[in-house]
Amino acid sequence: MSNRVFNFSAGPATLPLDVLKKVQEEMLSYDGKGMSLMEMSHRSKEFEQVIHEAEALCKELLNISDDYRVLFLQGGASTQFSMVPLNFLTEDKTADYIVTGSFANKAYKEAVKLGNVNVAGNTKEANHNYIPSQDELTLSEDATYVHITSNNTIFGTQWNEYPDTGDVPLVADMSSDIMSKPMDVSKFGLIYAGAQKNLGPSGVTLVIIRKDLLEKVPETLPSMSRYDLMAESDSMYNTPPTFAVYILKLVLEWLKARGGLDAVNQFNLEKAKFIYDAIDNSDGFYQGHAQKEHRSLMNATFRLADSELESTFIKEAAENNLVGLKGHRSVGGIRASIYNAMSKEGCIALAKFMEDFKAKHSK
């Protein structure tokens, strides 16, 4: 384990070391059965227990009522971009989309292929460096749903207060901040999240959907695009990503053992502060992208005042076992993704490196 690095990649991202050790321990023989869980039938009692325990843990950690179903689907959040409007954007309705970043825009682009869409808010002119307030939104009176992206991985902004949509279902892509803090699921009609940032490995997508919405799914849709069929079959309409679900369950157990989401949120606040303090106390050497009141606790994005130093920063950081810091190609700069599994030690090490780098390269 001595050669493990601090991995700040945006996803697939770092996983808890305790979870990796458990996977390693059970790799050759799960539950004494002489084979790994990835070799077992998804119809076996062993895997059925895993997926049912994963659903129960989700409900416990997020305090989800029996009005909702928890599903484990495939195709990532990108498949949900089209699956949501396929299921709920009928010809006589309009869907509202609030565009606060790249993935929010991708979701919008898929929806417009399938029906009428109103852009209720768009922060593009400010290069997506803030989250719009309620009074900045232009919501439709008869929308079938309102869609947001709760955390913007590329630009480093995050919703702190979700929009009030009244009786209109709020739909959220929470791929990069799910399970990072307590939240009131009852405010949402549907939540979806690719697992590869905060929940586990790539390959499985968490969906939390209110049961009354399942009754609105058109029977004319292809079977694999129907939320109601996925719910009826307990996420096993076809062969699910069994090994990814198993690791997701282990991550949920790890979150519970850490004290649940209140404790996790406090931990995330503490560790993010090291990095943001390094930015704010740099006398302009580092320049954060997001407005301070809208900063993400999951993705800290910043530039160097001297942009020519950014490649040197990334190179020297990697030499110090701080990897995955290159900003997204669409915005450049530096991005430190500090999801639940990133340790406080990793954030302290990055902050210290930032201070030393500034001292070395300041003019």
Image: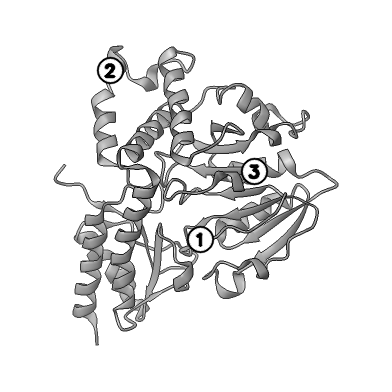
* Dot 2 and dot 1 residues touching (CB under 8 Å): no
Position in image of residue 195 (x %, y %): 45, 41
Kindly identify the residue that appears in the image at 42 percent across and 47 percent down. Answer: 197
Q: Nearer the viewer, residue 129 or 202?
A: 129
Tell me how far mark 3 sits from mark 1, CA to CA: 18 Å
Tell me how far mark 3 sits from mark 2, CA to CA: 40 Å
Q: In the displayed structure, would residue 248 be above or below residue 50?
A: below
Determine which quarter of the picture holds residue 233.
top right
* Dot 3 and dot 2 residues touching (CB under 8 Å): no
Kindly identify the residue that appears in the image at 38 percent across and 22 percent down. Answer: 38
Q: Which residue is mark 3?
A: 189
Position in image of residue 214 (x %, y %): 69, 32
Q: Secondary structure at mark 2?
A: loop
Kindly identify the residue that appears in the image at 31 percent across and 76 percent down. Answer: 309
**Callout 3 environment at 10 Å: few (<14), some (14 to 19), or many (20+)?**
many
**Residue 315, labelled with which disc?**
none
Sequence-wise, which precedes: disc 3 or disc 2?
2
Position in image of residue 345 (x %, y %): 21, 56
**Residue 160, labelled with which disc?**
1
Sequence-wise, which precedes: disc 3 or disc 1?
1
Q: Amino acid at mark 1?
A: Asn
Determine which quarter of the picture holds residue 164.
bottom right
Q: Secondary structure at mark 3?
A: loop
Q: In the displayed structure, would residue 298 be above or below residue 184?
A: below
Q: Which residue is mark 2?
A: 29
Q: Is residue 338 visible?
A: no
Sequence-wise, which precedes: disc 2 or disc 1?
2
* Dot 3 and dot 1 residues touching (CB under 8 Å): no
Tell me how far mark 2 sits from mark 1, CA to CA: 43 Å
